[in-house]
Structures are given as C-alpha cells and as structure tokens.
Amino acid sequence: MKADGVRHSDARVDAVEHAIRDTIRDVFGKDSPQFNRHHYFRIDDGPQYVRTDWGGSGASDPHEQRQFEEQMPGAITRLQGLIDQLEEKRADLGEPTIAPRAALAGRTIHPAILAAAERLYLGGHYTQAVFEAGKALISLVRAKSGSTQDGAPLMQSVFSVNNPILAFRDDLTDQSNKDEQQGMMHLYTGTVLAIRNPGGHRVGAVERPDRALQHLELLGYLADRLDEAKKVRNS
C-alpha cells in the first residue's frame, strides 16, 4: 500500500478502506476486539484530516494530499499489527485454520439446514452442528414423504427407483431419469450413513471448520433437491 501517485480523493481509496474493514470482520468476527477497534478503519486516521473532494474530479488540496501521504505509514503499521495477531492465533492453534463466521460468509445453505447448525457451527461445535443438520434433513424427508422410517431405510424407500414416494423427474421409464433417481437415492443414503449410525446417536468427529462446512453444504444441497422432488405416491 503506497501513496505514491494516489490522490486522497481517488474513489479507489474508499473501496480499499471498505475491503479492509470487511476483511477484519470476516477474519476476526464482528464481535471481536479487533473489529470493535478497527471497524471504522481509515487510511487518513489522523487528527485534523477532513476529505473535501470525494468525487475525484476536482483538484485536491495540497495540504489534504500531504496529510493523506503522512498517514499512510500509520495505516500500514496498523494492518501489520493485525497480521501479527492473526499469525499468533494460528500458532496457538497449532495449525492453519479459518474463522467460522468467515467460512459461512457468502455461502448459500438451505435455511432449514442452516437453522439447525449455524449456532453450533459458529460456537466451534462442529461435530454437533453436522449431527443436527443431518437430523434436520431426515425430518425434511419425513415431512415431505409422510414416511416414519429413519436413516438409510428411509432414504432407500422414499427415493426408490422402482417404487418411489418422491421422484426427481416425471418419467422414470426414461433411463436417464431412472439413473438420476438411483444416483440421488444412493447419495441420500450414503450421506446419512456417513454422518450417523442407524440409531442416530453418534456421528464421526469433525474437528475442522472447513470439513464441517463441506458436510453442511452437502446436506444443504440435498435439502434443495428435496424441495424440487415431487410426491408420486403415499407412504
């Protein structure tokens, strides 16, 4: 970040400041001391500095430009301090990681799955978050199909190729549609088997936020496809 050739009134300066604030929030969390301290981050964060030419079209006052350039080293120092804090945090954890809130940012996950898992995920309870999301998917399948079965048997009967309760295509005599139905049935069944046992009492440990997020995205995808499925018979 250099001030050479950059006017204090350049619109790119404002864009960079917004990007820095968003990054601090996503990396450290909106309730973190770092974000509370820097959520109004400005390169021109010095006394007696006021911008008067936001449009970038007029001539910049030399005094304002000089102060802008004088504040640049301080802005770099503040950013370096945040980077050092992040490195210390990573060292304490023993391995690189990502902030849970930052991991969820920008993701589109089915609302029912997100509602079941978000609080646990953001609290660092990744195994329980995945478990509750899996239970939510099963509840959605039961509600739409009317079936009272559980786990793998539920998925195998509801999405059966030959006698489904819920179908993803209208014409299952078509081989392509039939193959899709079978593939989705295996995907639902395999997902349930992978995250919980038939009794629904255990789930494989998920220690990393990125791995937990992969589980949640898969469960969210299956919930989205469930919304698209049509009921073709009663259970």
Image (cartoon, rainbow, N blue to C red):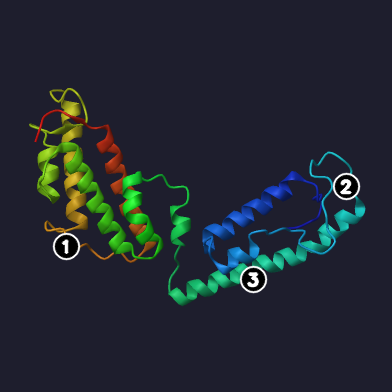
Residue depicted at x 59% and y 72%: 84
Q: Is residue 175 above or below residue 52?
A: above
In the image as oriented, which residue stretches furthest toward the bottom?
Answer: 92
Ranked by sequence position, the earlier of labels 2 and 1 is 2
Mark 1–mark 3 Cα distance, whole angstroms, equals 45 Å
Q: Which residue is mark 2?
A: 60
Residue 110 x %, y %: 34, 44
Which residue matches tag 3? 81
Q: Secondary structure at mark 3?
A: helix
Q: Quadrant of the N terminus?
A: bottom right
The C terminus - image quarter: top left
Image-based side of 16 in relation to 45, left or right: left
Task: Kindly check if marks 1 and 3 are in contact, taking CB atoms under 8 A apart as contact.
Answer: no
Residue 126 locus on image (x, y percent): 33, 63
Q: Which residue is mark 1?
A: 201
Question: Which one is earlier in the sequence, the residue at label 1 or at label 3?
Answer: 3
Asked where in the image residue 85 lies, by quadrant, the reply is bottom right
For discs 2 and 1, the disc positioned in front in the rendered view: 1
Label 2 – label 1 distance at C-alpha: 67 Å
Seen as rendered, the residue at the extreme right is 62
Q: Position of residue 72 (x, y in %)?
A: 77, 62
Q: Residues within 10 Å of mark 3 (few under 14, many from 20)?
A: few
At mark 1, the secondary structure is loop
Report the amino acid beneath label 1: His
Name the residue nearer the viewer: 232 or 12. 232
Residue at the location (20% across, 48% down)? 138
Q: Secondary structure at mark 2?
A: loop
Residue 164 higher or lower than 205, as above or below: above
